[in-house]
Amino acid sequence: MRTKWLQWLRRTHTFLGVFFSPLLLLFIITGCWQTFVTDDTRDKGYFNNLMGKFATIHTDDYYPRQGASQHGSEVFKFLVAAMAVALVISILLGLVLAFRSMKRPWLIFFTLLLGILAPAVILYFS
């Protein structure tokens, strides 16, 4: 029974990750671009113009096109909400799998603790 449960967890984790990975990558890449781009360089060059259009998906829920509606899509908002829920579920499944598959679960706990503390300490001291 335990083996079937772990197989189900792995399969669910895999398919959630595969289905939502393109949208997650879009949000990660555009979020990173928004973090590092300055107002002076935002509209300069093909790459920045393209990233600005993709960032509009990230911030306003639509892809800017000439003659198209400039309003966010309600259906897309539901897809993003489903992605967020699926990401949380997938992360939790990944943590369960990590704790169950390691012979030394304290290493997973320590790594998780570092993953919590590192950004907190960096933000606190910067």
Image (cartoon, rainbow, N blue to C red):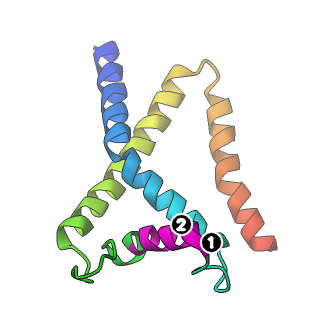
Q: Nearer the viewer, residue 58 or 123?
A: 58
Which quadrant of the figure has residue 18? Answer: top left
Q: What is the spatial separation of the Cα atoms under label 1 and label 2, in whole angstroms?
A: 6 Å
Q: Does the magenta stretch mainly form a helix, a strand or a loop?
A: helix
Judged left or right of residue 61, residue 119 is right
User: Would you say the residues marked 1 and 2 are in contact, meaning their CB atoms lie under 8 Å apart?
Assistant: yes
Q: Nearer the viewer, residue 31 or 106?
A: 31
Q: Which residues are magenta?
A: 45-56
The reply to whether residue 34 is visible in this rendering is: no
Give the residue displayed 36% in from the left and 46% down from the top: 89
Q: Position of residue 111 (x, y in %)?
A: 67, 40
**Neighbourhood count class around disc 1 (C-alpha, 10 Å): few under 14, some 14–19, many 20 upward:** few
Give the residue displayed 59% in from the left and 67% down from the top: 33
Which quadrant of the figure has residue 71? Answer: bottom left
Q: Position of residue 107 (x, y in %)?
A: 68, 31
Three-letter amino acid code at the position of disc 1: Thr
Which residue is outermost to the right? 125
Residue highlighted by disc 2: 31
User: For residue 64, which numbered disc appears in the image?
Assistant: none
- On whether residue 78 falls in the magenta region, the answer is no
User: For residue 35, which numbered disc appears in the image?
Assistant: 1
Which residue is outermost to the left? 75
The reply to whether residue 41 is visible in this rendering is: yes
Q: Secondary structure at mark 1?
A: helix
